[in-house]
Amino acid sequence: MNANLAATAQNLVRLAGAEFAYPGHADPVLGPVDLAIGEGDSLAVVGPTGGGKSTLLKVLAGLLPASRLGRLTGERLTMPGFRCGVVFQCPDDQIVSSRVWDEVAFGLRNAGLGEDAIRRRVSRSLELTGLGHLAEADPETLSGGQKQRLVIASAVALEPHLLVLDEPLAQLDPRGAAEVLAALAHLRAGRGTALCVAEHRLGECLADATRVVAVSEGMLRLDAHPAAPDAVNALSEMGLRMPVIVELARRVPSAWLAGVRDEAGLKAWAEQQRLAGSRRPDTCRSKPALRPKGPEALRAEGVTFRYARRGFGIENLDFSVARGERVALLGANGSGKSTLLGILAGLHRPASGAVRRAGRCGLTFQNPDAMLLASTALEEAAFGPRHAHRRSRHEAEARARETLAAVGLGSRMHEAPLALSRGQRLRLAVASVLSMQPDLLLLDEPTTGQDRRQLESLLTALGLACPTIVFSTHDVDLALEWADRAVVMAGGRILADGPPLQVLNDGPLLERAGLRSPAVLRLCAQLGLDPCGSLAELAERLEPGKADDTGGFSPRTVPEGRR
Amino acid sequence: MNSPAAATAVLDPRTKLLLLGLAGLWAVLLERPAALGLCAGLAVVALVLSGGRPGHILSAFAGLALAVWGFALTQAVFYQQAPRTPWVAWYPETGFWYRLLGEEGLAIYREGFGYGMTQGLRLVLALGSGLAVAFSTDASSLLAALRYYRVPFGIAFMAVTSLRFLPLLGREAAMAWQAARLRGFSPWRCAPWTSGAVAYSLLRPVLASCVRRASVIAASVTSRGFAPDDATSGAAAAASRASARTFSRLTAFAALLATAALLASKLLYAAYVHEVLYRSELRPLYEFARRWL
């Protein structure tokens, strides 16, 4: 049904009653869907993990059904000569050449263009994505953001009418994400290329979107302007993490009723309310209310570690964690967060220095799939107790059942781990570590690719199961609201270590570390307020006694007594 | 993957592929351990000069040595042809070992060891040459060279892409191993069958990742106009039209000449052995082929 017909004068591509089913499945995973994309459109495709976003994008791009794989019914209409570029989440999986220039030229050579035309287009695409100076580089040597921009450049070189991007920011640090978003904005402004971006980071992807399209359980639930009240309500009901400004407005009734949907609107509203100048530092509840620290759970002293090939690693680092603490490790890609976690877990042996652990230590990787070895979720969670604690099969499985129930996978224990959704796979990986009852849990990027509902469910389970947690993340908002301590790293060294509110409010420090300020703190600064540690507190300060303290994402999602 | 300073980088990729093909042919044609050892030695030298990372080269050496030793040992033990001369023999008369080994006992045969070494050297010659080419040639040059030899684009592309992703596979396997180790698995503390089962289960995440990555690559290259059966596809054209340097041409010519001589010698010797053709003036050649080829 992939007809190459003129849809309408404005439409680049249109799906009319399109349904897609994978081979061997009678029920479609997508549709029926009616969706049209016109010139200059910028769509943010949002929805819970496993809801059908990627399938929709592939159908739009004409990649599904691939030869004999799957069945598309309904219509997919494209304008004559329609070209579509596709960018996926992980740039490493898409780069096929060993030179940046060749990678961009790959598609052009496939199109049979002459060498002169190829040279012109490659140069233009590299300039457009800010990679002109790296034309001769080996893609392996690029940063995550540069690699993703290279993939975008490869797609852009084909001069597509529509560029489809499936979670292009998921693996990038804030600086890399900003680079990619700037390249996309430049592309849209300069070429008028229509964009269709599926992303969990709504705050970032909705900023330039003209339409937000929500997909859940294979159906199109919403197609509206991002600021439309219907859109906000629908996205919230789907359990998606809204842009902070929208979350804030929803919590402050008068702001919401006044139609505040963006930062400019909030500022105008605040000025109207004469709040902008009213600094009330004494009433700020979010001043570092540090919980009493327990005895030390772990201490690393003078630790140095270097990778044999890459050279860099960790340099003479001192670090300690007290029992009951939640520590967020922050930093750009390659700053040493994962290496430090590996050293703390005993995975890497430091060249000098020592690590002392007061109990058992569990580590989950950034890619949970690498940890899933067993044929059922139950066996997976029982693996640790069986091998580490030498428990009998019966005892290990009993322990595994408890842990799976705690992370919300009690009904999935007989399913194959790799058949679970991405969020469930991460929770299973965490459960497989929690079942060993660690005294300290180390989590490498637990937020990657998780929607809000999954993240809250995971954090709630973690808060109940293991009080001492060190986690690395790019999500500064999560670190501000959930951690007791923020540790900022760069170049294998610790740049700052302290209460999140203090560390994450230090603009020059964050700039130096390649991070950005949390949205809540940015809003506080814009409104001229003292920094607040959470959205709930900011809402309370904006409209004392009236703020709606529901929803959102705050420390109280974890019972205090268990922290 | 490549280093401009590598000694083997002075050769044109097409010449390297030609040499690789000829190395495979020589590995099949040669039978005498001395000649095979000489050629395998040359392959090892090429591997050393390939400019690959020291870790990769050392790993390759370890793998090749293990393979040769494995071939030699298994053939030395299980060699069934006659004549065979036992170097070491053990004939248990009673008990478990007698029941297991029977009256034949356990022996290590000299001829079997030699036969195994020959097979191992063949492997070193072919695999060492292949690794030298892979370490010293970047992906696009390799693709162009394959296309020059009219290898279908789909196959050439898949071959080159698989080379690029091999290190990633290695890293993922290592990660799965670390995940098992962090959860208390140690091959030294488990029964062998448990270790075997865990080792097998390590394949699961690696294979799942391969399938996922393959589908992403397929979608990505398809969206960029790649079609495996499209004659105009690919990065082949430009590089395949480039002319090779004189040194590369001379090397290719010498290798082809040597292969033709080897083939002719083996054919004439085979004709003599099977009493198809005998000429007295060729006796030195027969003697050379018998002793050295």
Image (tube, helix red, strand yellow):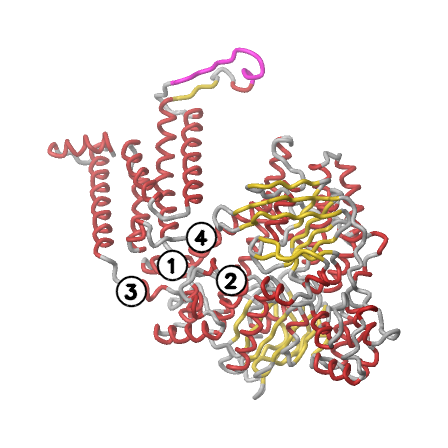
Task: Name the residue located 56 percent from the left edge and 74 percent from the top edge.
Answer: A182
| Residue A524 in sight | yes
Circle nearer the viewer, 2 or 1: 2
**Amino acid at the residue labelled 3:** Arg
Q: Chain of mark 4?
A: B
Residue contact between numbered discs 3 and 4, judged by CB atoms under 8 Å:
no
State left or right for residue B247 relative to residue B17.
left
Q: Which residue is mark 1?
A: B143
**Amino acid at the residue labelled 1:** Leu
Q: Position of residue A176 (x, y in %)?
A: 57, 66
Secondary structure beneath label 3: helix
Residue contact between numbered discs 2 and 1, judged by CB atoms under 8 Å:
no
- Tell me the distance, in whole angstroms, between the alpha carbons under discs 3 and 4: 24 Å
Q: Which mark is residue A94?
A: 2
- Tell me the distance, in whole angstroms, between the alpha carbons under discs 4 and 1: 11 Å
State left or right for residue B216 relative to residue B234.
right
- Tell me the distance, in whole angstroms, between the alpha carbons under discs 1 and 3: 13 Å
Query: Is residue B87 found inside the magenta-colored segment of the image?
Result: yes
**Amino acid at the residue labelled 2:** Gln
Q: Chain of mark 1?
A: B
Q: Which residue is mark 4?
A: B163
Q: Which residue is mark 3?
A: B241
